[in-house]
Image (cartoon, grey):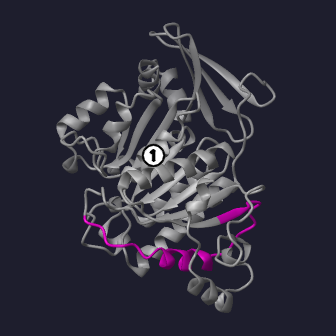
Amino acid sequence: MSLDLLKPVSDSLIDELNENYLQGSIYKKLAIHSSSFGIPDLESTNVCIIGLDEYRNSFFQSATQDLDSIRREFYKLKFSNWKLSISDLGNLPNGNTVDDTYHALYEICKELLSKKIVLIIIGGSNDLIYPIFKSFDSYSDKVNIVSIDNQFDLYQESELVSGRTYMNKIIIDDSNSLNDFTNIGYQRHLCSHDELQLMEKLFFEYISLGEISENNMKAEPIMRNSNIVGFDMKSLSFSASFDQTQGNPNGIDPRLACILTKYAGQSNKTNFLGLFELSNNKVSSKLYSEIIWYFLDGVDKRIIESNFNDSQTFNKYIVQTSGRDIIFYKSKISEKWWMLVDTSKNKSISYLPCLESDYLEALNDNIPIRWLKATKRV
């Protein structure tokens, strides 16, 4: 069983928590992998957490992460009125080689995916998205990846998987199971022209730091369609991370970080959230714990909305543009919007999450860019 590879949360931390943590805290509601009780029963579990310290293929120098520090801050937070069952499965130790770690993580992700359990990964570098992506190999559905990062990670100088090249490996992977890759938070002065051209050539989506800071709602439909969300903590600003050794003066602020992960949590499609390239200080640990809290708050608020032909649940709008008709759906429950994407070439139909602004744009005879890119990817 792949979960047998996981190491329990440290006894010293658990002893400390037993002495100091009050009723109502997350610690009191959590099932924890401990040396005394072993791995929790996952029969009714909705969300699992594991920690990693695998940085050997990181593009940046990363210090050993104090995962106990993050847990300590996270366990202090209040559980809220969630209906979730959450298990902390402990830490995945590094393998003899990075490939060994990849394989172990792949097996764990595959097992939890089969159980329909959402997994939060804390620690490690961006390249861990590759084995997470590979865990979908036995599934027929295409995979959507969202990266919150100030760069695209499309470097092509090396054949090795690293924190700056992993997306190239995913794009050319034999499984051909990648549907879409979206970057949120890129900074133009950190991205090469070649990378921007490649994003356009592959019809991938990207939202700059300025755009997402001005209107965070642009991220909601993208997160609603995501299977994997990777959050590179180097994309946080200096003031957010309190770490001037890695990061930039401009970056995502704490409030936006929590908003983005809450959007991800609300998505019925999001199976994995990874917090990568962590800083090692107490303020950062507090922020990471709050980011996880808001993701969980989103998971608790999930609404299943999938029967678009049900007139009791959805309103249907057909918009005639000079290019072609576009069909929109609006949920009567959540008031969220979708666009129908169909192509005669592949005889495929999908429902692309969107905003009301996309509908209004179509009413003005402008075909939404997201719809155009989606039809070209199909």
Residue ranking furthest to the top: 344
Residue ranking furthest to the right: 312
Whether residue 94 appears in magenta in the rendering, the answer is no
Q: Sort mark 1 into few (<14), some (14-19) or many (20+) by Cα contacts within 10 Å.
A: many
Q: Position of residue 265 (x, y in %)?
A: 60, 52
- Identify the residue shown where x is 47% and y is 65%: 93
Q: Position of residue 252 (x, y in %)?
A: 37, 59
Q: Nearer the viewer, residue 225 or 178?
A: 178
Residue ranking furthest to the front: 96
Q: Position of residue 36 (x, y in %)?
A: 69, 79
- Identify the residue shown where x is 50% and y is 74%: 70
Q: Position of residue 8 (x, y in %)?
A: 59, 72
Does residue 183 appear in this view? yes
Q: Nearer the viewer, residue 178 or 234?
A: 178
Q: Is residue 279 left or right of residue 220?
A: left
Q: In this figure, which residue is indicated by the disc labeled 1?
A: 131
Q: Nearer the viewer, residue 154 or 197?
A: 154
- Identify the residue shown where x is 52% and y is 21%: 363
Residue 256 position (above or below residue 106): below
Q: Is residue 35 left or right of residue 229?
A: right
Amino acid carrying label 1: it is: Pro
Q: Which residues are magenta?
A: 61-87
Q: Nearer the viewer, residue 26 or 209?
A: 26
- The secondary structure type at the circle numbered 1 is helix
Does residue 214 appear in this view? no
